[in-house]
Amino acid sequence: MGPTREDYHGDGGRTSGGMAEPAVGGPRAAVLRSWSMRARLPALVLAALFVVPGPARAADPDAYPSDDALRHYVSGRWLAETGDMAGASAELSRAMAVDPANVPIAVEACLVASRAGDAPRALELAHGVLARDPANATALWLEGAALVTLSRPEQALAPLRTAAAIDSANADCWRTLARTADGLEMVELADSCYEHLVGLDDGDAESWFQLATTRARLGRYADADSALGEAMDENPARPGALFLRGWLREKLGHPDEAAGLYEHHLQVHPDDVATRRRLVGLLAETGRVHEALAQARKVREASPRDANAWQVEADLEFRDHEPEAAMRTLAGMRALDPHGADGVGRSVEVLVQHQHAHEAIALADRWAAEHSGDLHALLLRAWARESAGQADSALAYARLAVAARPDSESAHRVLARYLRQSRRWDEAIGEIQLLRGMAPDDPSLLLDLGFCREQSGDVGGAIQAGRDAVAMAPDAAPVLNFLGYMLADHDRDLGEAERLLRRAVDQEPDNGAYLDSMGWLHYRQGAFGQARVELERALVITGGDPVIHEHLGDVYRELKLFDLAKQQYRKSLEGDTGNSRVRDKLQAVH
């Protein structure tokens, strides 16, 4: 998984009282500036800018008609500059009472309410301005900001979009819109806002950083890395920047660089356990097991009640040739909950992975003997044997679990899975049908049913199960992919298959299984070039899968790239040594 928005999302704008500080522009006697840009002028100087001497008023059509309104307005402005929001609001209210039709005064009052954090009052004033001046960009922006503060972000989008369109140079308006879109997970809109912000000010480090985060979330890793470089040039110490750069370097295929950046980040933020966990995984994946173990121990020390931290440490101890330490760590993990099955199950998993199947089964059997009345006892004994490759014994214990608890859905699910793995298709179909009575609204059971029917030779029944699943969950990507692939694989209704698969890929564009399905559909359609693109990308994302290797081999064969086809068939057989179909294809390629 990638980093979430919370991992590195910062507050780069100006806020006060929970509302975004506003910035505006307007005509001569009502020119209003952002609070951050206003000159802090004495009241008499400010008044001099606006008050026209008595004799000149008659000759000047722009002269302000009310000395009282102007006096209260200037006083309100000054009080706001000194930080007295209550006094400023009172003075501006008096100015509005004297000159209720004056839009600039109402806008100023709205700005003060916004700065004071009084969202209901700001919203009321914004609506009053917009009733007289519907295209007032400042009022639209303040309306949107108030709605966000009042937890109505969906309603805020329309006025914020309109304000940004009218006053496209107002950076604060774009920033408010960006944050609103971000909060609503409208990543593409947020991305376009931050792009506009850096266009307005290419030295805006925070907007560059936020642009990097949105591009990372959109999967545009190279663009994100470039934007982050701009942000770090302006503000190299920005919190979260080192983590994000490490994550991007990892995504771009530079694991050593990524590890160095994570380590640098941890020097600054040693209590960031989430980043340390990520570093552990990265070091382990790149073969730096001893270093990974050192970091894993720090994670476990920081999270002593986290069973997963203990499990990772034990796994790395086995890999680092410290079996006695690993056994002690596993025992410590089980001691977190001496009577629970979780620690035993985790221990079994680690032991089996490191060729200690005998100890794993013995451990499961001891726990089961101590908890003979617990359903988990039989299921744990079945799972330990299945993990150790003892399929027949695992199936026998699963049957015992069902016999002991015939009303247990979990026991039936385990039995159905082991029947599928043992290729006992008819028995598996019967067990799945029984499960459907227990969980009638679970579309995954229909997918299991469809798979078993296909394997037993009932292609029509398999497709029908897929159609039933789509009827039950019409927008679920796994369901769309299942039926789309089933149709493509059996050369049925390819137009429908394409519509289904496109919907699945649109939801999860980086899902390797869905890309494989789309590539195989293109193969069936005779579009071998398109098929090659999709399947090669699917291989990169999945890291290699026997089925995808076979599909890509078929595509290369059609493109007369015979050496590449052989290479893919061989890789497919490495992952599925018993596949006679692929072996025949390899022998047939000249």
Image (spheres, helix red, strand yellow):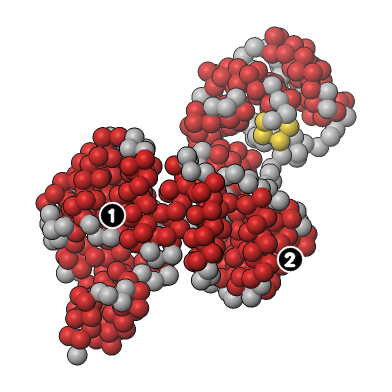
- Determine the residue positioned at 72% across, 13% down: 93
Using residue 354 as the reference point, say whether residue 41 is left or right of it: right
Q: In which quarter of the image is residue 41?
A: top right
Please determine whether, in this image, residue 552 is positioned above or below residue 424: below
Q: Camera-side residue: 328 or 249?
A: 328
The kind of residue on which mark 2 rests is His
Instruction: Give the Cα distance between marks 2 and 1.
Output: 50 Å
Q: Which mark is residue 359?
A: none
Q: Which mark is residue 264?
A: 2
Using residue 185 as the reference point, say whether residue 504 is left or right of it: left
Which residue corresponds to mark 1? Answer: 419
Disc 1 element: helix
Q: Quadrant of residue 419?
A: bottom left
- Determine the residue positioned at 54% across, 53% down: 366
- State the image coordinates of residue 343 (x, y, percent, origin top left): 58, 51
- Label whose residue precedes the other's in the sequence (2 or 1): 2
Q: Camera-side residue: 278 or 408?
A: 408
Answer yes or no: is residue 176 visible. yes
- Determine the residue positioned at 77% across, 36% down: 38
The kind of residue on which mark 1 rests is Leu
Classed neighbour count for the residue bearing mark 1: other residues with Cα under 10 Å, few (<14), some (14–19), many (≥20): many
